[in-house]
């Protein structure tokens, strides 16, 4: 569930992550994304989405390497590496990308996901050629030096403190991943930890770039104001000469075994004002046909004040906050429900209600109006994402990288519309009732030892 | 012009062997920014309706803006405006809370109500085909909210829980203390949503009174942007709001008193369990209508408004001391706060504070070179242009202008206005408005108090347990022995 943004100053927004994941599943029939596609001889996949009505253009490069590829003993490395991509290249001094984006009225950012790392920027469209040149530079000729490496590692350690140690529930989200997977590297924290970040060396950085940052492991997406032939010519000029290495790209090929038993763990943090509980279940990958109905189920459960868990738990004054999240990733997925308790209430109460609501969802077909509501919520969210070029490009990038199918970005709406009450019953029963839960309880350090 | 960064760079190629780097390809001719063209009409009851058609996506963002907010909270009961917003959607004369939530969500829309300092808003974002029904629901909620006792009590209890979570983070504590130092007992000195103690003291009648006094058509603006024609929007507004009655007496205008400038203080809030320290440096800033508004936002863009601003350059990029450092002016109906902040590991807090203080002084004394001023203005202009690409962004911009009584045509003047700000205006503004700020650090005092005392005489330390945000001394009054 961790997406780490390079520049994101906001505290970990649980709901923002939830919305992002809903957006993967929901494409609006009314808002098809029209894209062109080609593959360069060196393996780079290129997509373009033209919109001449806007004065800006978004450029994104997705590399199919994410926190699941972190080397042993180096958790947090993919994310640290992402930070290094903003430093120097053969022809760009450090921070030059900011000169080319922010300084001209645009912006740039990046995010390290479990399965991929995406670099994205938006600029006034007259800077498109410059940005394509810059992304070609980073792909082909990143250079690293000790001073920048150390300084950026310090920033990443501060980010760890900012996201994990300072917020009261930061550690819960790490514990949730660790308790949910026994073998798959999704269990390791994308943000790393201080000790393993300190163990990383500059040679690790160079090796990582050589291994993963290559045209045949990347997807370039350009969306917004451009002239097609000119775009194609620039892409050929700046990206075609980048060599494809001889070696194969290492893939993560770890099977997560199905859970035989339910699992319970308790974790503690400092400064935790109200206890919390998380329940997770293993679900299939984003490309599986059950990913969409599971997403609709999560929407029914917790999206909006009239959702089932909001009504039972929050209006029922048992929990201060609750949300359900169907996080279908590239290899497999995780369905999670997290509740932060209301004062004076025990996590056992929330757990009881959550299980009862899942049972109800499996036993009785969702009423037509309620199903329609969930679909409408997902469609409206998709529309909001597609208001901007960067949003369109991001939706397409996720479809390509997580589902291995660019057309999913448009087909998904029809898939959402086609979900029936029986589909919801079936996936809830199969994955969330018959599937074994992992339960993570989270409380303040002062409660350790108390019964 | 692409400008090389300054001194702290270590470029990996040895300088003596390097010919000048090939320049990146230059930009082409720029495209024009599309500015929204608002159309407006005021209903007979005084409700102002502003519409911006934008037909590229079948989506509409709508906001009912009530021009009263937390600055109108009764004394000692901070959080009334916010709690009124929280409960206003929880039941009307003809609909229960569940019916309202189901009604709006059936359309695929979400309705959110919230308060700021000078306004309270009810927002919807909805597919255009469902707009009429969404507007009806907004109108019912704004006009006919009943604030039922059980809804009030539930929301009050939940708010207290949420506040407890918020106030367990050092950043929230440091910010709250800074507000109290800057504004003293004036309303802006409170937390916008109050504290657990102040919210506990609120009664249902406070909400009913707030609603009665402030939620009225002549004190409100309806702003819509998206896939709707102006005439259609005006008809919808007339249908949903036309019979909303003006208030009997004139609406009370909250005259938020700005804080008197106070002797700057250095305060540590000791939070030994916190994962990181939060540094907040602040003082009074400007009001929105201040003639220096544009120099202020340009000065802020240079100082701490964005990734490449000075504070972030010095604190994050050059020294790796923080994930992010920044600053902001909150230009409100009366002068709001100016704050600069960063979170960092405990032992680095004094260094971060010193850097911020130094940067405030530098901006006040040395003029910003053109080569820096131009990109910082471009960053502001770009962010402005980008905000206009989404329906919600357009609604935000126009509601702010409507709230502060500024002509909507200000939107057309923003870009040239920013471009026209000079380096000397920035320096003069900084010299007049950035000195003598308070310094607040919330974190594990053991790790930084000694170092801080070397930098500043007169450092006060308050432990979290002793902190009372409502008290002018910031300390809980201890019972006499």
Image: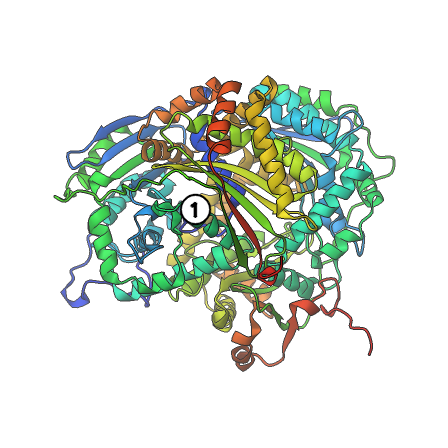
Between residue A63 and residue A175, name the one nearer to us.
A175
Residue at point 71% right, 57% down?
A: B190
Q: Is residue B435 visible?
A: yes
> Quadrant of the rendered structure where residue B409 is?
top right
In the displayed structure, would residue A224 be above or below residue B230?
below
Asked whether residue B405 appears in the rendered view, the answer is no
- Taking the image as shown, residue B220 lies to the left or right of residue A362, namely right
Secondary-structure class at tag 1? loop
| Residue A248, position as x, y percentages in the image | 17, 42
Quadrant in which the C terminus of chain A is drawn: bottom right
Residue B143 placement (x, y as % from top left): 77, 30
Tell which residue pokes out farthest to the front in this image: A261
Which one is in front, A74 or B412? A74
Q: Chain of mark 1?
A: A
Disc 1 crowd rating (10 Å Cα; few below 14, some 14-19, many 20+) is some
Residue matched to label 1: A2
Residue most extreme to the right = B248
């Amino acid at each position: 569930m961790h997406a780490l943004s390079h520049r994101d100053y906001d505290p970990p927004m649980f709901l923002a992550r939830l919305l992002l994941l809903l957006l993967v599943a929901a494409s609006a029939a009314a808002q098809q994304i029209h894209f062109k596609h080609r593959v360069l001889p060196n393996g780079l996949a290129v997509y373009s989405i033209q919109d001449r009505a806007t004065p800006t253009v978004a450029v994104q490069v997705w590399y199919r390497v994410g926190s699941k590829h972190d080397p042993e003993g180096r958790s947090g490395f993919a994310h640290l590496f992402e930070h290094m991509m903003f430093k120097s290249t053969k022809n760009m001094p450090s921070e030059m990308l900011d000169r080319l984006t922010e300084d001209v009225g645009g912006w740039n950012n990046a995010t390290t996901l479990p399965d991929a790392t995406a670099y994205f920027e938006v600029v006034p469209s007259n800077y498109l050629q410059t940005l394509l040149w810059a992304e070609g530079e980073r792909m082909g000729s990143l250079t690293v030096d000790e001073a920048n490496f150390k300084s950026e590692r310090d920033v990443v350690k501060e980010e760890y403190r900012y996201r994990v140690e300072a917020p009261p529930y930061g550690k819960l989200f790490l514990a949730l991943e660790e308790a949910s997977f026994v073998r798959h590297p999704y269990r390791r924290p994308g943000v790393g930890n201080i000790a393993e970040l300190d163990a990383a060396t500059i040679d690790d950085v160079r090796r990582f770039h050589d291994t993963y940052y290559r045209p045949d492991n990347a997807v370039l997406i350009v969306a917004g104001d451009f002239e097609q032939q000119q775009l194609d010519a620039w892409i050929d000029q700046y990206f075609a000469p980048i060599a494809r290495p001889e070696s194969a790209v290492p893939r993560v090929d770890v099977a997560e075994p199905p859970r035989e038993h339910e699992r319970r763990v308790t974790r503690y943090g400092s400064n935790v004002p109200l206890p919390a509980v998380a329940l997770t279940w293993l679900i299939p990958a984003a490309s599986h046909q059950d990913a969409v109905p599971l997403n609709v189920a999560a929407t029914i459960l917790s999206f909006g004040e009239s959702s089932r868990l909001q009504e039972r738990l929050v209006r029922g004054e048992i929990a201060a906050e609750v949300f359900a999240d169907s996080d279908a990733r590239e290899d497999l997925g995780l369905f999670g429900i997290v509740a932060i308790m209301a004062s004076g209430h025990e996590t056992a109460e929330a757990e009881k209600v959550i299980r009862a609501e899942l049972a109800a969802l499996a036993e009785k077909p969702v009423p037509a109006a309620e199903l329609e509501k969930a679909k409408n919520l997902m469609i409206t969210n998709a529309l909001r994402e597609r208001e901007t070029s960067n949003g369109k490009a991001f939706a397409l990038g996720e479809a390509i990288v997580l589902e291995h199918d660019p057309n999913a970005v448009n087909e998904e709406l029809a898939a959402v519309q086609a979900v029936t009450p029986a589909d919801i019953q079936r996936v809830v029963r199969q994955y969330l009732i018959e599937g074994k839960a992992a339960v993570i309880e989270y409380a303040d350090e002062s409660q350790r030892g108390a019964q | 012009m692409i400008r090389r960064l300054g001194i702290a760079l270590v470029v990996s190629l040895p300088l003596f062997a390097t010919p000048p780097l090939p320049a990146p390809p230059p930009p082409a001719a720029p495209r024009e920014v599309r500015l929204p063209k608002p159309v407006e009409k005021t209903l007979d009851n005084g409700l102002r309706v502003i519409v911006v058609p934008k037909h590229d996506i079948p989506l509409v963002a709508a906001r009912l803006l009530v021009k009263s907010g937390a600055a109108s909270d009764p004394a000692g009961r901070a959080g009334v405006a916010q709690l009124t917003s929280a409960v206003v959607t929880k039941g009307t004369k003809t609909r229960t809370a569940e019916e309202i939530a189901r009604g709006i969500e059936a359309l695929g829309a979400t309705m959110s109500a919230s308060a700021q300092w000078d306004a309270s808003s009810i927002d919807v974002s909805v597919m255009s085909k469902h707009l009429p029904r969404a507007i009806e629901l907004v109108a019912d909620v704004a006009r006919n909210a009943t604030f039922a006792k059980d809804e009030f009590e539930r929301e009050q209890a939940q708010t207290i829980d949420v506040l407890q979570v918020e106030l367990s983070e050092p950043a929230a504590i440091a910010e709250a203390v800074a507000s109290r130092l800057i504004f003293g007992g004036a309303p802006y000195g409170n937390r916008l949503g109050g504290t657990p103690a102040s919210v506990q003291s609120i009664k249902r009648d406070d909400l009913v009174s707030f609603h009665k006094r402030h939620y009225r058509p002549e004190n409100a603006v309806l702003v819509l942007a998206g896939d709707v024609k102006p005439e259609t929007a005006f008809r919808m507004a007339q249908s949903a709001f036309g019979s909303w009655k003006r208030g009997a007496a004139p609406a009370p205008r909250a005259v938020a008193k700005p804080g008197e400038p106070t002797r700057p203080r250095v305060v540590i809030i000791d939070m030994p369990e916190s994962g990181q320290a939060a540094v907040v440096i602040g003082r009074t800033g400007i009001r929105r209508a201040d003639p220096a508004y544009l120099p202020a936002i340009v000065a802020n863009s240079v100082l701490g408004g964005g990734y490449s601003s000075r504070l972030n350059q010095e604190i994050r990029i050059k020294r790796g001391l923080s994930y992010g450092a920044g600053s902001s002016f909150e230009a409100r109906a009366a002068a709001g706060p100016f704050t600069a902040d960063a979170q960092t590991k405990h032992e680095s807090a004094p260094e971060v504070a010193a850097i911020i203080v130094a940067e405030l002084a530098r901006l006040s004394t040395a003029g910003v070179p053109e080569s820096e001023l131009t990109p910082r203005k471009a960053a502001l202009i770009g962010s402005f242009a980008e905000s206009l690409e989404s329906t919600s962004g357009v609604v935000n911009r126009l509601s702010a202008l409507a709230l502060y009584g500024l002509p909507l045509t200000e939107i057309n003047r923003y870009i040239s206005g920013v471009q026209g700000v000079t380096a000397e205006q920035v320096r003069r503004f900084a010299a007049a408005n950035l000195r003598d700020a308070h310094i607040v650090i919330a974190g594990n005092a053991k790790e930084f108090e000694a170092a801080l005392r070397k930098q500043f005489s007169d450092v006060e330390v308050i432990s979290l347990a002793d902190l009372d945000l409502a008290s002018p001394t910031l300390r809980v009054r201890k019972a006499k022995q």
